[in-house]
Amino acid sequence: MPVFKFHGLCPATHTPFHADGSLNLAVVEKQAAYLQARHINAVFIGGTTGESTSLTLAERLALGDRWAQVAQTSGIQVVVHVGANCLADAATLAAQAEKNHAAAISMIAPSYFKPRTLEDLVGCCEQVARAAASTPFYYYDIPALTGISFPVDQFLTLAAQRIPNLAGVKYSNPDLGTYLLGRQLAGGRFDLPWGIDEYFLSALAMGAQGGIGSTYNFSAGPLHRMIDAFGRNDLATAQIEQARLMQVIRIVAQRGYLGSAKALMTHLGVPVGPTRLPNANPDAASVKAMLTELEAIGFFQWKDYRKD
């Protein structure tokens, strides 16, 4: 199995749609180019930000194929979220990701019929991971959306006995104490990329080496500078950058986060289109107000990252 670990920023990318809500896969190349110009070399596709639960299996397969094509020419690494309520669908997506030489795969647990025990959760992951046995596998822990909350250190201990390609956990869980236990388990064997942008600085203090986040698409600068500042023990600067990111999140989220985030990306020159129901989209007046507020805090001056 190839070695893969998350380092730095890995955006959870939007799935691009036409105005009518159909897939607009021609935009994927532009997404990759935009991110690479901002010192990002890996993406997490088809996850929460990518509206995976609002896509058909055929659409998710098409999205995976398109990103694989773009990866061949751009060199960007692609991590594919394959989780689904139907484990057979998840296994199909996992097998495709391995065929397309994805850097890794990840999955949320089924969340309509929920695994009631840790054994059942591991069994779900084992079934899907087996379909891509040569690709690093990450469980995606996001209890706020799945309603499933087993301590990740306990999950990793049991799963390591049954999933040979287990690499770690995509950790979108505010429980920093349990995150630290997972990080330290087995001498730091497992990779736990952080997944809650609002607490990124706290995660760095707990040993995070990388993260997967939605705001990385449009606000990579504060996160890059936060990592740099933390690395040189400049906590005051790191706190300033975290506070900047919090301001952006508040401004975008108050109008409906996902639709507003996609509108912002379109404004920045990456036309990812609208969201699908049940997510909603802001009207023109709301987008204008959002951009005005972002301008007022200096967002367009400091959103990007420049290496010295």
Image (cartoon, helix red, strand yellow):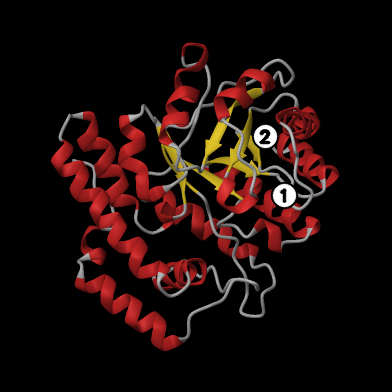
Q: CA distance from mark 1 to mark 2?
A: 28 Å
Which residue is rendered at x = 34% and y = 51% of the image? 220
Q: Residues within 10 Å of mark 2 (few under 14, many from 20)?
A: some
Residue occupying the far top of the picture: 187
In the foreground, 91 or 304? 91
Image coordinates for residue 154, horizontal then vertical, percent = 60, 23
Q: Is residue 211 above or below residue 48?
A: above
Q: Is residue 187 above or below residue 146?
A: above
Can you tell which mark lies on residue 163? Answer: none
For the C terminus, give its image quadrant.
top left
Residue 137 in view of the camera: yes
Residue 46 in view of the camera: no
Name the side, left or right, on which 78 lies relative to 20. left
Mark before the other along the chain sequence, 1 or 2: 2
**Residue at label 2?**
101
Image coordinates for residue 6, horizontal then vertical, percent = 47, 32
In the foreground, 278 or 153? 153
**Residue at label 1?**
111
Q: Secondary structure at mark 1?
A: loop
Residue 224 falls in image quadrant: top left
Residue 109 falls in image quadrant: top right
Which residue is rendered at x = 70% and y = 63% of the image? 54
Amino acid type of the residue tagged 1 in the rendering: Ser
For the N terminus, give its image quadrant.
top right
Q: Secondary structure at mark 2?
A: loop
Amino acid type of the residue tagged 2 in the rendering: His
Name the side, left or right, on which 66 lies relative to 99. left
